[in-house]
Amino acid sequence: RPRSLSGVQATSDSLHLGNYIGALRQFVAQQDTHEAFFFIANLHAITVDHDPAELRERTLRTAAQFLAAGLDPERATVFVQSQVVAHTQASWVLECVASLGELRRMTQFKDKSARNERVSLGLLSYPVLQAADILLYHPDVVPVGEDQRQHLELTRNLAERFNARFGETFTVPEPHILKATAKIYDLQDPTAKMSKSSPTAAGRIDILDEPKAVAKKIKSAVTDAGTEIAYDPEGKPGVSNLLTIYAALTGSSVEALVSEYEGRMYGHLKVDLAEVVVESLRPVRERTQELLADTAELERILDRGAARAREIADTTVKDVYAAVGFL
Ligand code: AQP
């Protein structure tokens, strides 16, 4: 089986619909076709100011949402990043392979450093830790959203550079970005990606939102002054985003939806989509709440996941240390 690996940051109480469609659902699909490793990135979560109690809570909540969305700890290895020390060990070595210039050029660093008053060194080296996260497991594919393409490219470059200098050690991974769902947009600003850190929650649907709130957000989604329901991301970004979400959650094609809604109004599409989203998220929200009622069991699952992850990651670190000349 090919191996798949990806992670999600523990930076919010609830994942959003972009994380769910762009990442989580791909994870769930891959647990049957791949040897799958999915982790909660808590080391990455401290690159910007954070509250320790909140981080602890969010780590568990993110894990609960992984499982509630359908990840099965028997079929996929689900773990917390900080519990596998190899990630930080490999990261240091890769930091010495990466250059300051290439890290400064990362779009996410430029955005986030402009938004934060205090810019930590970790915010700059973040993509190197991400490269370590990935390369430790020799994955064949890394399922992510479009926003991660540049970091994936850096990971590939670092792997190639390391291999050229110190001998074949890392597998050069391929991104797995599903074109149709790679970028879900903000409902209030359909030219911006739906994001945990968007200024208002009105444009973002959280997995754990109450059904009423979900319906309200969809009904007030920004569209355009026209009336035709058509897929045209340039001219009709709002409507196109609604169609993308609808298609992703129901499995029907955008073309089929466009012909189904021919001659109908935006309001009809929104009412139906609200129903689709509410019903898709309902079981995930309910299961998350159940899982969070017994965090001891959740922590046991994560301990087992970390033990399995360590078996692979520790072996890679040994190879890396030997390759660079550590005793
Ligand atoms: N809008 C999106 N559409 C499709 N995929 C998305 N992802 C994020 N937003 C969208 C994918 O979700 C995975 C986990 O995200 P993360 O926690 O690593 O990413 P993030 O970039 O921190 O998420 P946010 O919401 O955008 O937070 P901020 O605003 O802090 O940057 C990744 O695979 C990501 O591609």
Image: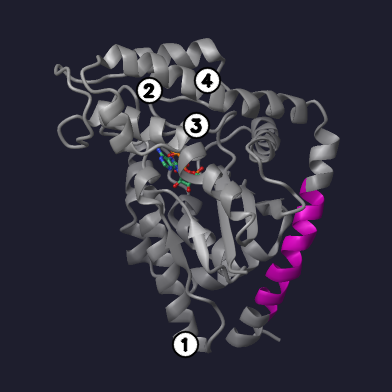
The answer as to whether callout 4 falls within 8 Å of ligand 1 is no
Amino acid at the residue labelled 2: Gly
Main SS of the magenta segment? helix
Q: Secondary structure at mark 2?
A: helix
- Measured along the vertical axis of the image, is residue 87 above or below residue 169? above
Question: Which label's residue is closer to the chain start, 3 or 2?
Answer: 3
| Residue 137 vs residue 255, the one in the foreground | 255
The residue at the point 70 percent across, 51 percent down is 79
Question: Which label's residue is closer to the chain start, 4 or 1?
Answer: 1
Q: Secondary structure at mark 4?
A: helix
Mark number displayed over residue 165: 1
| Residue 163 vs residue 29, the one in the foreground | 29
Disc 3 crowd, CA 10 A, few/some/many (<14, 14-19, 20+): many
Q: Nearer the viewer, mark 4 or mark 2?
A: 4
> For residue 310, which quarter of the picture?
bottom right
The residue at the point 58 percent across, 71 percent down is 138
The answer as to whether callout 2 falls within 8 Å of ligand 1 is no
How many angstroms separate mark 3 from mark 1 (CA)? 41 Å
Residue assigned mark 4? 278
Residue assigned mark 2? 203
The residue at the point 19 percent across, 35 percent down is 232
Residue 60 placement, left or right of 232: right
The answer as to whether callout 3 falls within 8 Å of ligand 1 is yes
Amino acid at the residue labelled 3: His
Disc 2 crowd, CA 10 A, few/some/many (<14, 14-19, 20+): many
Image marks 3 and 2: residues in contact by CB distance under 8 Å: no
Q: Nearer the viewer, mark 1 or mark 2?
A: 2
Disc 4 crowd, CA 10 A, few/some/many (<14, 14-19, 20+): some
- Measured along the vertical axis of the image, is residue 167 above or below residue 125? below
Q: Nearer the viewer, mark 4 or mark 1?
A: 4
How many angstroms separate mark 4 from mark 3 (CA)? 13 Å
Residue 206 placement, left or right of 204: right
